[in-house]
Amino acid sequence: MEMTSLSSQLNKSVKRQFMSLPQGDRCQVTYVWVDGTGEGLRSKTRTLHKEPMTIQDIPEWNFDGSSTYQAEGSNSDMYLIPVAMFRDPFTLDPNKLVLCEVLKYNRLPAETNHRARCRKIMEQVKGEAIWFGMEQEYTLCGTDGHPFGWPKNGYPKPQGPYYCGVGADCAYGRDIVECHYKACLYAGVSIYGTNAEVMPSQWEFQIGPCEGLDMGDHLWMARFLLHRVSEEFGVVSTFDPKPMKGNWNGAGCHTNVSTLSMRREGGLKFIEEAIEKLAKRHDKHIALYDPNGGQDNQRRLTGQHETSSISDFSTGVANRAASIRIPRHVGQEKMGYFEDRRPAANCDPYSVTMILAETMLIDPEEQDKEYDFEKEYM
Amino acid sequence: MATSLSSKLNKAVKQQYMDLPQGEKVQAMYIWIDGSGEGLRCKTKTLDSEPKTIEDLPEWNFDGSSTYQSEGSNSDMYLIPAAMFRDPFRKDPNKLVLCEVLKYNRKPAETNLRHMCKKIMSMVDTQHPWFGMEQEYTLLGVDGHPFGWPSNGFPGPQGPYYCGVGADKAYGRDVVEAHYRACLYAGVQICGTNAEVMPAQWEFQVGPCEGINMGDHLWIARFILHRVCEDFGVVASFDPKPITGNWNGAGCHTNFSTKEMREDGGLKIIEDSIERLSRRHMYHIRAYDPKGGLDNARRLTGHHETSNIDEFSAGVANRGASIRIPRAVGQDKKGYFEDRRPSANCDPYIVTEALVRTCLLLEEGEEPTEHK
């Protein structure tokens, strides 16, 4: 099959023979980090002499940042600081996957390490118990770059039957979705659900509810798992926000938010106040809702295909063409959460959750502060 | 290429992930009927523990503007769990959950025919109405041509295929076998299968089911069929006349009885019911496919073991009639009868409801009665 990779056609029973070898008390720990593009993920593995029980048991490491768009060759070492540990669904217990923050040679956060500032903000608003749920859309492609299952030199029938669809004429690549779901459950990632999306070969999974900093950790790890599962099948997952031009949906990362006060009786008032604050900082949010300052979202937020227009801020109950949608049942129960539909599929969840928390919960005079990380990672 | 690209993905790789333990978490796949009245949709959510009964399953919602069910400006629709089954794809403790759809104002969606069916069935539960539905369907490749048929042509004429065996007679039996086993695992009341008259056409029967269960079990059986076909990379079609010409159509013959009909002397009740049905033919025809009779117009021609759509007829062992009384029932003078009019893509909720309205609630006239 020319659209799946050569790797995926290697003999899996040969692989199984080796993967089932016992490993004594040695433990393989795979360090995962975000590279210089702010979208790409990298990983490498090391052996530990026994199973780490908590994140504190995992040592710092380093890597060659000049090979990941993150540093010059002359001064290329960068630090990996373990921050979140998960079970490894590929090599299984006791092995681990460890999400890391990246520090430059001077121990300050790397340019694309947005977790650092996110952590500062979340610490300040801890009392509000801010919860997030993010709906990650993505498109499956063959190694030729064309959406997986689409006719080679053409297009499938127009959108309509694919959303939540079933059947070989509607659902392309469900195996990847099923395996990714199981991998997340095993790893301990808070996967909430999955569904087929409006464009054929497009799918969605939801991560949450997660409090504060956990949202970014779980979503980045879920993305890593998706890339690895897709790699095993020989296909590619892309988070490009508008993979196909024309009458085809784009891919977003709708972000659901609530605070303790919004979740209580009468919470709708706090939701409406929050939305007013968001309305005043639309441009600031758009700049952080994709890794290219809003340029990626230009291709996606057109006002059509269930998106709002990038230049206007709007809200509505059950309205999928608005920037912010208040779910119908929240409108009825007068408490709950709201959905920000602006983030692109390739957004950095640390940036998205950080700016939402900052705009909603931090005084305007204290916003956009520069934080000093000098002593942070000593 | 007849089978989909998806179906060629490496299944050994898939098995490796499907074997992963999932702790206490349970995957519940919510299933509903979309705005076409024929299409099925599904999405999954994680639950923190295994639901024991339908009451343990929370309500959910979805984007109705993407399923031909609402406008984008007011798109949220509700999913209300109605019937729970074991999941034969993800296996225990995971579940398949058939749902009713409500609009934003919590009234039943246009194609939520279960709502009214349930009301009607509750009015006659002491009569114990039983149903058995014979679901015919055609297997197609992803190119839309019947599976196994020559690429630019036709197989030999009908004759050897019905209940046939052999690679020259039975096309796609793997799907049938897998579907049967999946239904048994799930808890669907599947009572049999056979190859049909047209090559690549098959039938399974679901029943006997009482009341609302008939619709629930048949819709889940259809979902399971679509998912099994998806895994094999082929498509199941419920189109009532997939190929024009001298090829059979696909129906959903519905067998029906009440406690009285099943008891001694029941034949009299059967004959009375048939008499009532004969006076309400067009009302039933409108209920027997999702387009008010337009789909069946292509199928009920009077040929290929169908009755003519314009005329009502009944007869013992007669497959050219609207209603057939099985030979054994004619002899025992009790049992059930078969309504051969419903098309393969009918909604079983409204089919079973119509039979109950006419035969048990003794309704007359072209429109269903509004009951308080």
Image (cartoon, grey):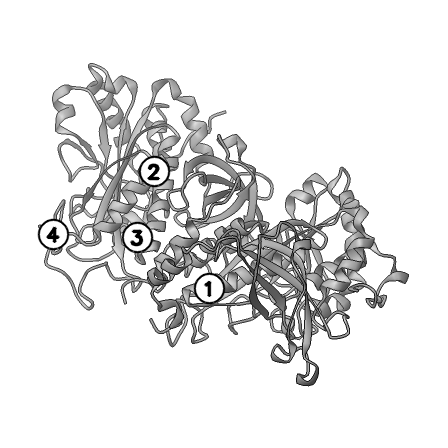
Residue found 53% across the figure and 46% down from its top: B45
Mark closer to the observer (1, 2): 1
The residue singled out by tag 2 in the image is B185
Quadrant of the rendered structure where residue A361 is?
A: bottom right
Say what amino acid the circle numbered 3 marks: Ser
Say what amino acid the circle numbered 1 marks: Ser
In this view, the residue in front, B358 or A156, is A156
The answer to whether the residue labelled 4 contacts the one labelled 1, judged by CB atoms less than 8 Å apart, is no
How far, Cα to Cα, is label 1 from label 2? 30 Å
Mark closer to the observer (3, 4): 4
The residue singled out by tag 3 in the image is B237
How far, Cα to Cα, is label 4 from label 1? 39 Å
Mark closer to the observer (4, 1): 1
In this view, the residue in front, B85 or A266, is B85
Identify the mark nearer the N-term, 3 or 2: 2
Asked whether the viewer can see residue B71, the reply is yes
Q: Position of residue A340 (x, y in %)?
A: 68, 57
Q: Position of residue B233 (x, y in %)?
A: 32, 58
Callout 2: 10 Å neighbours few (<14), some, many (20+)? some
In this view, the residue in front, A74 or B197, is A74
* Mark 1 residue element: helix
| B260 vs B28: above or below | above
Quadrant of the rendered structure where residue A170 is?
A: bottom left
Mark closer to the observer (1, 3): 1
Is B270 on the left or on the right of B110, as rendered? Answer: left
Say what amino acid the circle numbered 2 marks: Tyr
The residue singled out by tag 1 in the image is A230
User: Chain under label 4?
Assistant: B
Q: Are the residues under marks 4 and 1 on the same chain?
A: no
Q: Which numbered disc covers residue B166?
A: 4
How far, Cα to Cα, is label 1 from label 3? 30 Å
